[in-house]
Structures are given as structure tokens and as C-alpha cells.
Image (cartoon, rainbow, N blue to C red):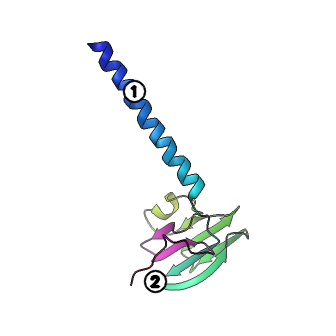
């Protein structure tokens, strides 16, 4: 009886791994890369920057945003928890980096809007 349970466990693990690989592959294939990073501070647009051009943006002496090789990340922040830095690099449409203490948001937007991107007001 124990051998049957082990075989079923192995099959279950293999099925879960296959599903995870398919989901990860679909995300890589179908995620739309962004064309620009929009930085907002306290709800107002601070600036819009192309992801095609490498640059470093100093935002209100609080945050430093870096765009390099088509991805954007928060390199430095004077907030106490540094969670915005830990959020990592983003490059796909709709992804965001949020710094709550400094009220700063970096969002990636693509040049073309897909059917799934719907804004509700």
C-alpha cells in the first residue's frame, strides 16, 4: 500500500510542476513589455520616461529611479523601510513600484493598449 501512495505523490508533484511551468511560460510569452515609465508623486505626474533610454531620475530628493536595459527599478529611497527598493525591477505593462512614505509611484505602460487593459472610473 505504501508504494501506491508514493507513486501517486510523485505523479501529483509532476503534474503540479508541469502546470507551474506552463503558467510561467505563458507569462513570458504573452506579457506585454512596457514602452514607458510614468512617475507620479502625491497623485500628480512627475514625468514620463522611455524604457528604451538608459537614465537615472532623482525624484524630489527622496527617491532615485533607474531605467536601464528596458527595465526600471527604485535604486535609492530615504523612506525607513525601503520596501520600494525591495520590489525589484519591472518592465511589463501595468507593473508598479510604490513608495508609500514618499507618495511616489512608478508604473510601466505600453505604447499600445491591449483588450485586457480597461480603466474603470
Q: Residue at x 67, y 69 (%)?
A: 51
On residue 42, the disc is 2
Q: Secondary structure at mark 1?
A: helix
On whether residue 114 falls in the magenta region, the answer is: yes
Residue numbers of the magenta segment: 94-117
Q: Residue at x 53, y 75 (%)?
A: 62
Quadrant position of residue 6: top left
Q: Position of residue 37 (x, y in %)?
A: 60, 73
In the rendered image, the residue lying farthest to the front is 115
Quadrant position of residue 31: bottom right
In the rendered image, the residue lying farthest to the right is 53
Please give left or right for residue 60 compared with residue 9 in the image. right
Crowd rating for badge 2 (residues with CA inside 10 Å; few <14, some 14–19, many 20+): few
In this view, 6 is above or below 93: above
Residue located beneath label 1 in the image: 11
On whether residue 74 falls in the magenta region, the answer is: no
Amino acid at each position: 500500500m505504501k508504494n501506491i501512495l508514493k507513486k501517486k505523490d510523485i505523479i501529483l508533484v509532476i503534474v503540479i510542476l508541469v502546470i507551474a511551468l506552463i503558467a510561467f511560460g505563458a507569462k513570458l510569452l504573452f506579457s506585454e513589455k512596457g514602452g514607458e515609465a510614468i512617475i507620479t508623486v502625491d497623485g500628480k505626474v512627475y514625468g514620463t520616461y522611455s524604457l528604451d533610454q538608459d537614465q537615472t531620475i532623482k525624484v524630489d530628493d527622496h527617491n532615485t529611479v533607474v531605467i536601464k536595459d528596458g527595465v526600471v527599478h527604485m535604486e535609492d529611497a530615504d523612506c525607513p523601510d525601503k520596501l520600494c527598493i525591495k520590489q525589484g525591477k519591472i518592465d511589463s505593462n501595468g507593473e508598479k513600484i510604490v513608495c508609500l512614505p514618499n507618495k511616489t509611484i512608478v508604473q510601466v505602460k505600453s505604447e499600445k493598449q491591449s483588450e485586457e487593459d480597461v480603466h474603470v472610473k
